């Protein structure tokens, strides 16, 4: 049979040419599918990211509200929870991309018998309308718009996707660990100069940096527990959270009449250190509106850093306000909340030097340690450890030496070089000192507008800047080997030239809010399962 090859060629060509058109359609369809898949991925990723933001804000709101349940008579927990909800730009935890449309707050009395492992405080009636409560629950709802799905009518501005998150928290005080807390406040001259217009959120008032710091301590004291929560009055009852106050520069250790900063005597090298003893002559005037500034000692001349030993009378009970009536608490007076409102003074006369105060604070904590009580040091400073050799003068030897605190001289004296490195090594000494019960000190550091450059010669990186020094003074979060963040805070001063915020710190911009956060970490409400509510 004869085959006509010529007749087949047009057919093959036609089939081939028709397949070219089909491939083009397939490529277009595939591209459309890929674009749709990418769009869905972006929208799902945005939805997931928005939910995480909402959940974080809701948890913060629940903890903040639970923190204030025992002080309901002073602050409404619902109002506090709303302030942390992120619903408006004036709130904490606000995210511009997250449109929170509703915040609902409710309370409950969760049985401590049914859930003994939650360590809940007992149910108590802090507000007659709410009845007996010991827990709070916050539910937040947000409207999320999409980028691509909106073209198909999903997640449009008029029909957004609604997401919600719920968090529950205990009231503060239940099963809380008792604390011995030493506050170490910078009282160098720079803390008393200028005004800070931004240390209190929503406040139009301007205060000196020192008073801003004292307002922060007032905030901390309003959250701590002076005694157990079930006592209506702490008078005569065992203390729970004890607070002591130290400052640097330290006071002149001489108690003779007429001693001032200019004539504080130079003590012999054989002098026994007394830098953890409150100077009864000079410490009281430091918070009693003195007509003259208290005398300051050089850092190697046995300065007395301790202004007030441990106190637990800062509030009459766990639910009371600060004990300001009649100046009944020296500690409250010392941080400017007493009837005089003078607070800690900033006499000047010496530069910033951290290491001496850190060691003194640790020695005081060790000497007064209570079994199964967590020791805490909170250091606040705006400065740069660069005191002059004159300001470092004196010959009184420390009880620690270069093998424990690198940077010191061979004679157990603080060196005027490597001062930032000495501070970090002093903090490491404090953090690694083990008490008889196996606990060690937790250090919070608050950098209040510290510079990003400075320190003295002979420093070791990364301790060669004030920011790096304050960061490495702080404790590390448990289970991490990196830089501190949970215990390191950096806030700006609004006064000229000191608006720096150190990198790697907890990002908070109001000083009193830093102390609220520290209080929450120490004493605050804890998240509990929503199922028990």
Image: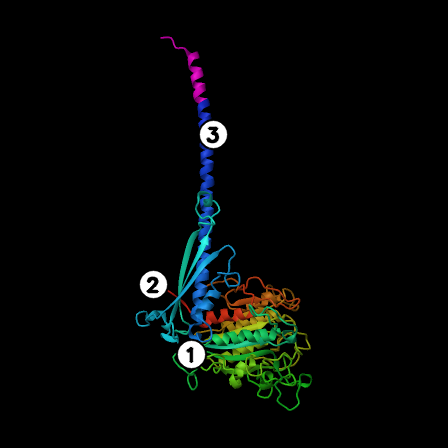
Which element carries disc 3, helix, strand or loop? helix
Q: Residues within 10 Å of mark 3 (few under 14, many from 20)?
A: few
**Closer to the camera: disc 2 or disc 1?**
2
Q: Quadrant of the N terminus?
A: top left
The secondary element bearing badge 2 is classed as: helix
Q: Is residue 337 part of the magenta span, yes or no?
A: no
Q: Position of residue 41 (x, y in %)?
A: 45, 46
Instruction: Say which residue label 1 marks.
Output: 371
Q: Which residue is mark 3?
A: 24
Q: Is residue 133 visible from the viewing direction of this image? A: no
Chain part drawn in magenta: 1-16
Report which quarter residue 340 is drawn in: bottom right
- In this view, 330 is above or below 200: below
Query: To which quarter of the image does residue 448 belong?
Result: bottom right
- The image shows residue 318 at horizontal and vertical percentages of 43, 78
Residue indicated by mark 2: 531
Q: What whole-number distance in Å separates the C-alpha atoms at marks 2 and 1?
A: 35 Å
Secondary structure, magenta segment, majority class: helix
Q: Is residue 43 visible?
A: yes
């Amino acid at each position: 049979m004869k085959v006509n090859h010529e007749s087949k060629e047009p057919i093959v060509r036609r089939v081939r040419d028709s397949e070219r058109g089909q491939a083009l359609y397939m490529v277009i369809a595939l591209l459309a599918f890929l674009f749709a898949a990418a769009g869905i991925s972006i929208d799902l990723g945005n939805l997931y990211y928005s939910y995480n933001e909402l959940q974080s804000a809701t948890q913060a709101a629940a903890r903040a509200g639970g923190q204030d349940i025992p002080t309901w008579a002073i602050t409404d927990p619902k109002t506090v929870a709303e302030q942390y909800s992120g619903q408006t730009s004036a709130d904490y935890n606000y995210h511009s991309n997250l449109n929170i449309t509703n915040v609902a707050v409710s309370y409950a009395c969760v049985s401590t018998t049914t859930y003994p492992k939650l360590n809940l405080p007992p149910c108590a009636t802090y507000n007659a309308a709410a009845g007996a409560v010991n827990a709070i629950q916050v539910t937040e709802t947000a409207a999320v718009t999409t980028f691509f799905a909106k073209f198909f009518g999903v997640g449009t501005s008029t029909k957004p996707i609604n997401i919600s998150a719920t968090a529950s928290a205990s009231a503060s005080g239940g099963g809380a660990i008792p604390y011995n807390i030493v506050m170490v406040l910078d009282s160098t001259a720079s803390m008393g100069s200028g005004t800070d217009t931004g240390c209190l959120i929503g406040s139009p008032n301007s205060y000196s940096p020192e008073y801003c710091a004292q307002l922060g301590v007032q905030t901390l004291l309003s959250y701590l527990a002076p005694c157990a929560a079930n006592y209506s009055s702490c008078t005569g009852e065992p203390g729970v959270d004890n607070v002591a106050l130290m400052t640097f520069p330290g006071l002149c250790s001489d108690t003779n009449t007429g001693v001032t900063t200019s004539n504080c005597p130079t003590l012999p090298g054989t002098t026994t250190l007394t830098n953890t003893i409150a100077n009864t002559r000079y410490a009281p005037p430091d918070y009693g509106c003195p007509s003259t500034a208290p005398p300051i000692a050089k850092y190697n001349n046995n300065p007395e850093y301790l202004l007030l030993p441990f106190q637990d009378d800062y509030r009459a009970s766990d639910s009371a306000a600060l004990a300001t009536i009649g100046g009944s608490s020296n500690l409250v007076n010392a941080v400017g909340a007493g009837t005089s409102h003078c607070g800690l003074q900033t006499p000047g006369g010496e530069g910033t030097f951290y290491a001496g105060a850190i060691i003194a604070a640790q020695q005081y904590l060790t000497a007064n340690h209570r079994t199964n009580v967590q020791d805490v040091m909170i250091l606040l400073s705006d400065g740069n450890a660069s005191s002059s050799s004159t300001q470092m003068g004196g010959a009184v030897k420390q009880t620690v030496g270069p093998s424990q605190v690198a940077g010191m001289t061979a004679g157990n004296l603080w060196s005027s070089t490597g001062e930032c490195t000495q501070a970090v090594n002093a903090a490491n000494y404090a953090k690694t000192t083990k008490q008889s019960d196996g606990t060690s000190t937790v250090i919070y550091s608050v950098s209040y507008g510290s510079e990003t450059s400075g320190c003295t010669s002979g420093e070791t990186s990364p301790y060669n800047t004030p920011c790096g020094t304050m960061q490495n003074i702080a404790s590390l979060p448990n289970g991490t080997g990196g830089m501190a963040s949970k215990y390191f805070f950096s806030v700006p001063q609004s006064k000229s030239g000191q608006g720096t915020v150190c990198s790697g710190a907890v990002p908070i911009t109001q000083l009193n809010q830093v102390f609220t956060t520290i209080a929450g970490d120490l004493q605050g409400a804890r998240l509990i399962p929503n199922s028990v509510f």
